[in-house]
Image (tube, grey):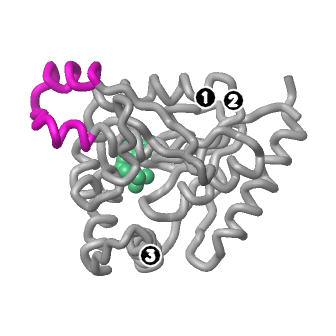
Amino acid sequence: MKKIVIAIDGYSACGKSTTAREVASILGYRYVDSGAMYRAVTLYFLDHHIALTNPKEISRALSQIHLSFHINKHGLNELFMNGINVEKSIRKMRISENVSPVSVLKEVRSAMVEQQRKFGKDKGIVMDGRDIGTVVFPNAELKLFLTADIQVRAFRRQQELLERDKLVDLNTIMANLTARDRIDSQRKESPLVKAADAIEINTTHITLDEQVDETVRLALWKMITKKG
Ligand code: DC
């Protein structure tokens, strides 16, 4: 069967990453969490006190950042920055609270998009993010746009943090998600919008298994009917 590109976009905490990871594993595809890349850049910028108003400093910092994904012994994809596993550090609230202002920067976006396109050059990839179907892979064979009610999203994110032994109250999470949605949708560079040809899935009342099944079903259909 022909390999395709699957782009999954949507608001924060709609289950994009979990769906993308599962679908990639079922199809034997590569999974790339593009949000993790913006989170890693944010970690680097915070640790190195990069001024977000200084384009030269930003470009210099970006040239020092090397990102790669590696599969761990549990089969999970983990992000390494300059050879160091940053998977845990990038999931902290400190990063969630600072990632949107970093990901609005033009220099940051073009560096990440270039790298993401390299990851997808041989197809057979599932990538999730905000601009994957609109900017990174406008010709992706399958584009999904996930949505869900804010309370459900906040609760799911709280459970995820709890699994990492972090108890964060729902109001804090909800405020963070709302702020990120606003910045992500209103920014000038590649705002979060549904691609005209994306299929919208509201995940409020469906389970993760249902989300995954539906995505795999759509992907198989695209693979079977793909020409060329
Ligand atoms: O998917 P996530 O919540 O881990 O993403 C973190 C942030 O990164 C999100 O608030 C916006 C930014 N992001 C982006 O601007 N473009 C992407 N393709 C993915 C994420």
Amino acid on which the number 2 mark rests in the picture: Lys
x then y, percent, for residue 63:
28, 19
Q: Residues within 10 Å of mark 2 (few under 14, many from 20)?
A: some
Q: Residues within 10 Å of mark 3 (few under 14, many from 20)?
A: some
Sequence-first disc among 3 and 1: 1
Q: Give the CA distance from mark 3 to mark 2.
A: 32 Å
Q: Which residue is mark 3?
A: 159
Q: Which residue is mark 1?
A: 120
Select label 3 or label 1 by which is in front: 3
Horizontally, is 102 left or right of 140 in the view?
A: left
Q: Which label is found at residue 123?
A: 2
- What range of the chain is rendered magenta? 42-64
Q: Is 59 inside the magenta-drawn segment? A: yes
Which quarter of the rendering shows the N terminus?
top right
User: Residue at position x 25%, y 74% from top?
Assistant: 172
Whether residue 203 is situated above or below residue 151 in the rendered picture: above
Q: Residues within 10 Å of mark 1 (few under 14, many from 20)?
A: many
